[in-house]
Image (spheres, rainbow, N blue to C red):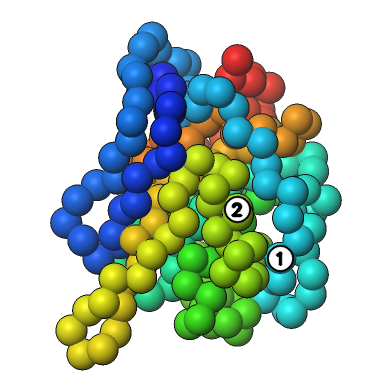
């Protein structure tokens, strides 16, 4: 089991192309029956309207109501952390029953709106699951979403050849279907077995992290 996290300051940035793991200012205490890391205090689902991969407006709170929502902010050119998270979640959804999987909504919000057009997001997300939701918006909107989740806004890091990578928080946030609060977060080393176990606990057993 992973320990309880009390996050006092904004989550530090994590370069998808870098060597380091994400780090936080935190206090560890207690234990949890869930595999995810306890988020204290809980984080409210951002009240924002972004643009989905079909070019339609997508009010986050409306579309995610009633489902366990896994929210992640990343970018499609990420070589490691972002596709790893998505692949682990996709495998977990195949491991649980179809009824359980149908109650989980995966939302990927880009931190690289310059390159991640709706079409690019859709093509990339379809590698993991056709039901995965991809969202984009203006830089101000995306920065606001990250700030509301106690994460520092993503930053471009120049690379050789004139390109860039993106530093961003690398946690998946799990929001409850009723209060739409994130009481669990998942770091980059979370396995599909961990995700599957928590899907079963949250949905099949009806447990809620306090």
Residue on which disc 1 sits? 50
Residue at x 63% of width, y 19% of height:
207
Residue 205 as seen in the image, left or right of residue 94: right
- Residue extending farthest to the top is 30
What is the C-alpha distance between the residues marked 2 and 1?
A: 10 Å
Residue on which disc 2 sits? 145
Q: Are marks 2 and 1 in contact (CB under 8 Å)?
A: yes
Residue 125, image x, y percentages: 53, 70
Residue 144, image x, y percentages: 60, 54
**Residue 24 falls in which quadrant of the image?**
top left
Residue at x 79% of width, y 58% of height:
59
Residue 35, image x, y percentages: 43, 27
Check the picture and name the quadrant holding the N terminus: top left
87 vs 43, nearest the viewer: 43
Other-residue count near label 2 (Cα within 10 Å), few / some / many at <14 / 14–19 / ≥20: many
Residue 188 as seen in the image, left or right of residue 154: left
Residue at x 49% of width, y 66% of height:
111
Kind of element beneath mark 1: strand
Kind of element beneath mark 2: helix
Other-residue count near label 1 (Cα within 10 Å), few / some / many at <14 / 14–19 / ≥20: some
10 vs 168, nearest the viewer: 10
Residue 140 as seen in the image, left or right of residue 190: right
């Amino acid at each position: 089991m992973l320990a309880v996290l009390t996050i006092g300051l904004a989550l530090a940035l994590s370069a998808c192309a870098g060597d380091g793991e994400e780090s936080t200012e935190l206090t560890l205490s207690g234990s949890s029956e869930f595999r995810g890391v306890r988020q204290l205090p809980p984080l409210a689902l951002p009240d924002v309207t972004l643009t989905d991969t079909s070019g339609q407006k997508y009010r986050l709170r409306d579309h995610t109501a009633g489902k366990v929502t896994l929210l992640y902010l990343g970018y499609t050119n990420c070589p490691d952390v972002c596709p790893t998270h998505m692949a682990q979640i996709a495998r977990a959804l195949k491991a649980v029953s179809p009824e359980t999987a149908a109650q989980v909504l995966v939302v990927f919000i880009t931190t690289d709106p310059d390159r991640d057009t709706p079409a690019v997001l859709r093509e990339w997300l379809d590698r993991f699951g056709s039901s995965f939701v991809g969202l984009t918006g203006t830089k101000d909107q995306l920065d606001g979403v990250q700030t509301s989740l106690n994460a520092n806004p993503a930053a471009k890091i120049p690379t050789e050849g004139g390109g860039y990578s993106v530093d961003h928080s690398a946690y998946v946030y799990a929001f409850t279907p009723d209060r739409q609060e994130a009481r669990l977060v998942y770091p980059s080393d979370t396995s599909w077995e961990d995700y599957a176990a928590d899907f079963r606990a949250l949905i099949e057993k009806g447990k809620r992290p306090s």
